Amino acid sequence: MEVFIYIADFELGKSQKTFQKYNLSNEAEIILNELSMVYFAVISQEQIDVKNFKLVFGVTSFNLGSGFIDSDGLYHYSLIIDKDAFNLSKNLYNIQNYLVRFYQLFLNELGFVKPQIIYNGNIRYLNQIKINSNKISENNFDLIVKSLMFNNYFDEEVLYKTSLPTDFSDFKNSFFESLKLLHGKIEKACKSILSFKHKSIRKYKTEHKVLSYSANSIIDDVSFDWLFQNLHVIENKRNFDSYDLKLQSKECKIKEMSQQVSNYSYNSYENRLILGYVKLYILKLNEHRKNLENKKILRSRYSGGFQEHLILKYNEIIDLYLRETVSYFNYFHNYFENVLKVYDPLLGFPKDSFSFLSLPHYKNCFELILLYNNLFSKDIKNNSVKSYLEIESFDKLFEVYVFYLIKDIVGMKFSNKYNFIYSGDNRNKLSGAYIFEKLTSGIGVTLYYENLPKEIELLTLFTTEDKKYNPDYVIELSINGYKEFIILDAKYKNYNNSERYRGDIKELTFKYLHGLGVVNNSHKVSGLYILYISEKEKFKRVLRKKFDILESENPILPSIAGISIDPKSFNFSNNYIESIINKHIEILKNRVSVE
């Protein structure tokens, strides 16, 4: 039984009428674009019981159609594709003298897909498929995933999947893979440790010292104050080749003087942050070693079977990696404390990642900081099934990334302290209301993620309880009983096509500005914004400039616009999301003062 993938040639952003054919059992790596039109065929020398066959991609599985037999006696089967879920090609392609339509199976997917066949209870793994994005650069993809890792979004159901397979021929575990990754990164960091002395981010300070005076000395008002209090350093002689000053027409020489001296130390913010995480790693790794020893003692009390024996051997390998990794971190720790004299270690996410990304050895440490919260949060589960690493569709990851952006922006402007009320939606652990502490000005803010404020109601006949039109995010601003709601929706699109942008604006305007709303005069929906991915940040207006919220003193409400987000250059202290929040706060204050 062989599985073949047919990929329509992709040029200039469009699928062509020609295609390439690959065998998923033989090809080392197959690369395609998320927009690619594909077709899967299963060919077998024996008839397949289609009721007991599934072709699985991550969390999505496909059944086979009835198929046909060719002149060589081979059975050919194709996948049953839901036409409503996957776009079909306009072109017809000739496959084994049958005209078929290809389908867009991997739209909004990104990363690696590892197909598998499940047939009559047996699992067979096929070679992986790499999917490149048509909407986002590798750099921005990397930054978004690292941001989600740091926020601890990925759990064992999404990214890190623990596995102890029943078939021990491919013995893997996400904890082990993560530990190997960490081992490699800290080993690499230690090899470049001398760079922290020669190409270090330093802390500079200026002080005054009494030194021999010359024409090149750096002096200031403090220097002259010192000189007037120490006149004995002025020598009144005439045999100098040159003089420094004249006193009553007499040429004088200054022997020494208090001078400005710039000194530096290695105790910079970045180095203190690195030291803080190195200490945390040492603490965490030693804690894992201790836990591992406890497990070994526990398992030695009884005679286990082959599985227990393998687990014991596995733990020995884990312990070896832990010991070596700890030794690398100790070396790093000792160099920072004893050679660079770094003290007062810090913790927290870097205020500005640019300084870490500007030098290779600091970038290595930045990646270690990002990895800390995620690598060791999972324990070994002896009863778990064989699984593998995969990433869910990227449109969802982008939506979650934008949620963290908004939450952090609101937190920086208002307060990092908030109360979270979970919506109860088991499909999204983050959905609910985030109620931030009020500003001293009395303005309150609540961020809703995949959840609606109770004041927003269904208005039109086209919105029903069965099919609620929930936007991704709603920001509620409140003061003295007055409320304004800003609706934001994330779109994993780049909107190079203006027609597509206008189409989405029209759709969301009807869904969220007409389908949803408030009936209380003191409450208003005052803005609708699309947040989308791009390689350049910009504000995409819908209204004319004189009516636009960022350009006009009296903008038309509700405001409608698009905001593109470029992760690699996003500035938390100066961005369009913060600008529109500030403008809506100003509008709310003016409305309250007038009414």
Image (cartoon, helix red, strand yellow):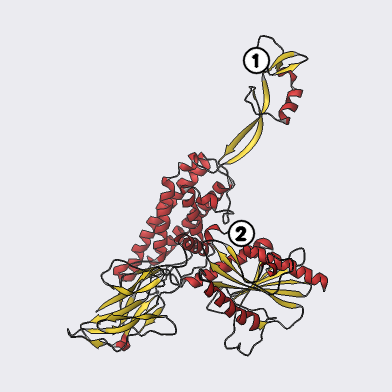
Looking at this view, is 312 or 51 the one in front?
A: 51
Q: In this view, does 454 lie above or below 233?
A: below
Marker disc for residue 204? none
Residue 432, horizontal then vertical, whole percent: 61, 75
**Quadrant in the picture for the N terminus:** bottom left
Q: In this view, does 34 lie above or below 83?
A: above
Q: Residue at x 30, y 87 (%)?
A: 50
For the question of whether residue 247 can be seen, the reply is: yes
Q: Is residue 169 above or below residue 245?
A: below
| For residue 150, side relative to residue 476 (left or right) | left
Judged by depth in the image, the label closer to the viewer, 1 or 2, is 1
Q: What residue type is labelled 2?
A: Phe
Q: Would you name the residue on which mark 1 appears?
A: 242
Q: Which residue lies furthest to the top in this view?
A: 239
Classify mark 2: helix, strand or loop: loop
Q: Residue at x 57, y 86 (%)?
A: 467
Are dots 1 and 2 in contact, CB under 8 Å?
Answer: no
Q: Distance between the residues labelled 1 and 2?
A: 57 Å
Looking at this view, is 482 or 10 the one in front?
A: 10
Q: Residue at x 71, y 68 (%)?
A: 584
Residue 24, horizontal then vertical, whole percent: 29, 73
Residue 208: quarter of image: top right
Q: Would you name the residue on which mark 2 appears?
A: 572
Residue 401: quarter of image: bottom right
Tally the numbered discs.
Answer: 2
Classify mark 1: helix, strand or loop: loop
| For residue 267, side relative to residue 245 (left or right) | left
